[in-house]
Every structure is written in structure tokens, then in C-alpha cells.
């Protein structure tokens, strides 16, 4: 009986953590298709869209070491709660109809995003049973991604609605972040002093400037490669659909979101059985295939098919890489390690958005997807190079 309890995934704390993350990611997914359309409506180019997205990634990366040290010395739940509140407040700047104000809002959102994710990953690493980390990672990342089923489409509907518009979409995203903060408050109570505060003789400022945690470099590098092409499927895809006059494009997000919802826990469990290396090979091959097919199928059904392939690859890869990060994160500095790991997502998102916007301005959307496939294929080379360690 004791072993069964210790191996249980769906505890109260894990359920509340997942709900808070779901709402926090829903806030983000409402803004993913909204911001590119809003910026172009203000006269911005695709490259300017990339700059705004990169501002989000830059601040998220810069502040992660400080946030990770904070999580080690305080509590992951409290850090997550503060991040959710910061996300909500930051969006207020989007109500100012200037591209510069939107860039500032997204830069501030990056700090809140870093805190929300670092706190969440720290809690996950302490609550997930070691024997079921792949499955727990699949559920956790699946819950985070579940927002893609409805919320990008809801954001687009709010923009087009007679009572709506961009400001209504921004207000809705703020409300989601605040509700997430209320849920997060239920898991923000420390259960005891953090291990780092007890055992680490290294001062907090020294931890801040020692930078990236070396134990997590491989997992973070793999996540970087896996997510580098993601802006093409989340932000630029709405501009690509608009260029091709694709109607009812919100259904694209519904179909790909359902794929992510179903695939992440199932493929997370599969990844526990087939191993890390094979899981990553499958992940990168699926992503590359979906990206290469996209320029050839500029219809709603064709884009859905390509999106499903891509999301299946992202699902199995994301679950396995998160499990790898939890396995390699030292217990005495888990917050710092998971902060280092979570830096890979905004860094890849920012760089990927900048490169994608630049390619669109120079050569068009078709070449953007081809170049994104080439970038994603770098993950195959990284997997092959470290095959022994991943095996």
C-alpha cells in the first residue's frame, strides 16, 4: 500500500499544479495568434513581429538564473504565483496602441513566464514519482498544451466578434492569468525549508552569476532544437493562413490542440518503454516532415494534417526531454537546474521567431517553413552525437 501511494501521480498538489499551469498557458495561447495580427494592424512587418516575440524570450532567459535561485531559497509554488500575477499586470501595456508598448508588455510578460514555469517545474520535480517521470511529464506538458485546443481559436473569435476586438482579447487573457493565480495560491505554501537553503554554502548572488547548470545542458539543448521551429506553427501560421485566404482558421488550433492533448500522456508513457534516444529520433522526424509538407498544402485540411504531424513530434519529444531534465537535476539545486532547463523554451522561441520573420521578409512563408525544417533537423544530429548518454 505504501508503494502504491508513493507511486501515485494524481495527488491534490499535482492536480492543482496542472490546473494553474493550464490557465497560465491558456493566457499565453490567447495572445499567440492575437499579437501578430495586432502588430501588423499597427503597421508592423513580420520581422517586427519577430522582435516583439524575441523581447518575451530575452527577458525570460535573462531573469531565469535569479528566479531559479529564488525558487531554491523560497518555494516553487510561491514563485509560480508571483509569475502568474506578473503575467496579468504586464498585458495592461498592450492597451496602448503602439508597437513599442506591445514590445514592452511582451518583455515584462517574459519575466512572469519565467517565474511561472520555473516554479511549476520545481514543484513537478519534487512531486513526480521517480519510476513514472515520463508519464507524469506527459500529463504535465499535456495539460500545459491543452490550451491550444480552444484558446487560440477563442482569441481569434473575440477579435472578430462585434462586441470584441484586440482589447477584449487582452482583457480575456488577463482574466485567465488572474484565475490561474487564485488556483496557484492553493499550492504556494512551503512544506519546509528548501534543501538549498539548508545545505548550500554558496551565496545567492554567486549562484546567480554562475549561470547555466551544467547537469541540465543536454536536456536544455535538445528542448531548444525541438522548439526552435514552434513560432512557425503558433504565431506566423495565422499570417500565412491570412495570405492564403484560409477561412475558419481557428479549427487548425482545435485539431492540433486535441492532437497534443491525446498524444502527450500516451506518447510520454511510450517514451518510458522505448527509451530516450528512439523517442527523440521519432520526435524530430515528425517535426521535420510536418514542416516540409506545409508549403505544399496551403489549405485548411492540409495545414491541419501538417500541424498534427508536428504536434505528435513535439508531444513525444517534449515529454521525454522533460523526464530527462528531472532525472539529471541535482536535488540540492533543483530550482536552479529546472530554471536553466526552462530557459531553452523562450530562448528557442525568441530566436526562432526572429529568424522566421527575417526569412518571411526576404523570401516568403514557404521558405520560412523549409528553413525551419532544416533547423529542427539539427536535433537529429544532437541526438546522434549523444546517443550513448541518451541510450
Image (cartoon, rainbow, N blue to C red):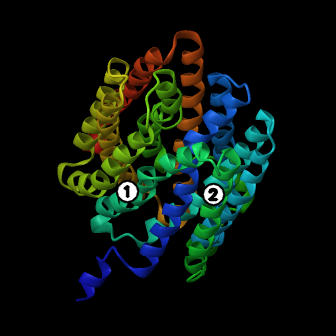
Label 2 sits on residue? 172
Q: Mark 2 and mark 1: span between their CA atoms? A: 22 Å
How many numbered circles are shown?
2
Label 1 sits on residue? 142
Quadrant location of residue 380? top left
- Please say whether residue 300 is visible from this viewpoint: yes
Q: Nearer the viewer, mark 2 or mark 1?
A: 2
Quadrant location of residue 355? top right
Q: Residue furthest bottom?
A: 1
**Rendered view: 8 above or below 272:** below
Of residues 242 and 385, the one drawn nearer to the viewer in this rendering: 242
**SS at mark 1 in the image:** helix
**SS at mark 2 in the image:** helix
Is the C-beta separation of discs 2 and 1 under 8 Å? no
**Residue occupying image coordinates x 74% and y 53%:** 90
Q: Residue furthest top?
A: 363
- Please say whether residue 72 is visible from this viewpoint: no
Residue 245 on image: x %, y %: 47, 24
331 sits to left or right of 380: right
Quarter of the rendering occupied by the C terminus = top left
**Residue occupying image coordinates x 50% and y 47%:** 152
Crowding at label 2, few (<14), some or many (≥20) Cα neighbours within 10 Å? some
Residue 221 on image: x %, y %: 46, 38
**Residue occupying image coordinates x 54% and y 24%:** 356
**Residue occupying image coordinates x 33% and y 71%:** 129
10 sits to left or right of 3: right
Amino acid at each position: 500500500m505504501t508503494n502504491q501511494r508513493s507511486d501515485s501521480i494524481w495527488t491534490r498538489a499535482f492536480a492543482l499544479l496542472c490546473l494553474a499551469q493550464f490557465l497560465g498557458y491558456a493566457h499565453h495561447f490567447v495572445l499567440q495568434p492575437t499579437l501578430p495580427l495586432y502588430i501588423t494592424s499597427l503597421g508592423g512587418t513580420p520581422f517586427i513581429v519577430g522582435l516583439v516575440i524575441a523581447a518575451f524570450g530575452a527577458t525570460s532567459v535573462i531573469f531565469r538564473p535569479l528566479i531559479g535561485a529564488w525558487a531554491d531559497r523560497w518555494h516553487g509554488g510561491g514563485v509560480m504565483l508571483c509569475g502568474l500575477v506578473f503575467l496579468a499586470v504586464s498585458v495592461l501595456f498592450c492597451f496602448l496602441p503602439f508597437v513599442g508598448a506591445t514590445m514592452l508588455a511582451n518583455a515584462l510578460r517574459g519575466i512572469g513566464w519565467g517565474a511561472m514555469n520555473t516554479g511549476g517545474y520545481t514543484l513537478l520535480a519534487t512531486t513526480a514519482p521517480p519510476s513514472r517521470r515520463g508519464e507524469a511529464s506527459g500529463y504535465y506538458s499535456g495539460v500545459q498544451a491543452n490550451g491550444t485546443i480552444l484558446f487560440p481559436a477563442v482569441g481569434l473569435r473575440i477579435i472578430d466578434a462585434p462586441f470584441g476586438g484586440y482589447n477584449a482579447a487582452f482583457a480575456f487573457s488577463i482574466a485567465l492569468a488572474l484565475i490561474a493565480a487564485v488556483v496557484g495560491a492553493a499550492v504556494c505554501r512551503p512544506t519546509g525549508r528548501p534543501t538549498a537553503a539548508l545545505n548550500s554554502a554558496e551565496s545567492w548572488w554567486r549562484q546567480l552569476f554562475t549561470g547555466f547548470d551544467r547537469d541540465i545542458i543536454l536536456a536544455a539543448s535538445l528542448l531548444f532544437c525541438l522548439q526552435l521551429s514552434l513560432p512557425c506553427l503558433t504565431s506566423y501560421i495565422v499570417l500565412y493562413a491570412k495570405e492564403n485566404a484560409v477561412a475558419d482558421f481557428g479549427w487548425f488550433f482545435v485539431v492540433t490542440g486535441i492532437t497534443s492533448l491525446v498524444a502527450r500522456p500516451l506518447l510520454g508513457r511510450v517514451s518510458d518503454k522505448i527509451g530516450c534516444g528512439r523517442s527523440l529520433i521519432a520526435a524530430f522526424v515528425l517535426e521535420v516532415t510536418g514542416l516540409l509538407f506545409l508549403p505544399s498544402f496551403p489549405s485548411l485540411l492540409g495545414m491541419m494534417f501538417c500541424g498534427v504531424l508536428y504536434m505528435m513530434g513535439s508531444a513525444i519529444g517534449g515529454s521525454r526531454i522533460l523526464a530527462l531534465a528531472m532525472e539529471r537535476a541535482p536535488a540540492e539545486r533543483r530550482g536552479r537546474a529546472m530554471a536553466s532547463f526552462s530557459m531553452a523554451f523562450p530562448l528557442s522561441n525568441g530566436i526562432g521567431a526572429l529568424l522566421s520573420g527575417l526569412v518571411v521578409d526576404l523570401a516568403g512563408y514557404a521558405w520560412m517553413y523549409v528553413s525551419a525544417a532544416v533547423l529542427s533537423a539539427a536535433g537529429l544530429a544532437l541526438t546522434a552525437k549523444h546517443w550513448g548518454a541518451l541510450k
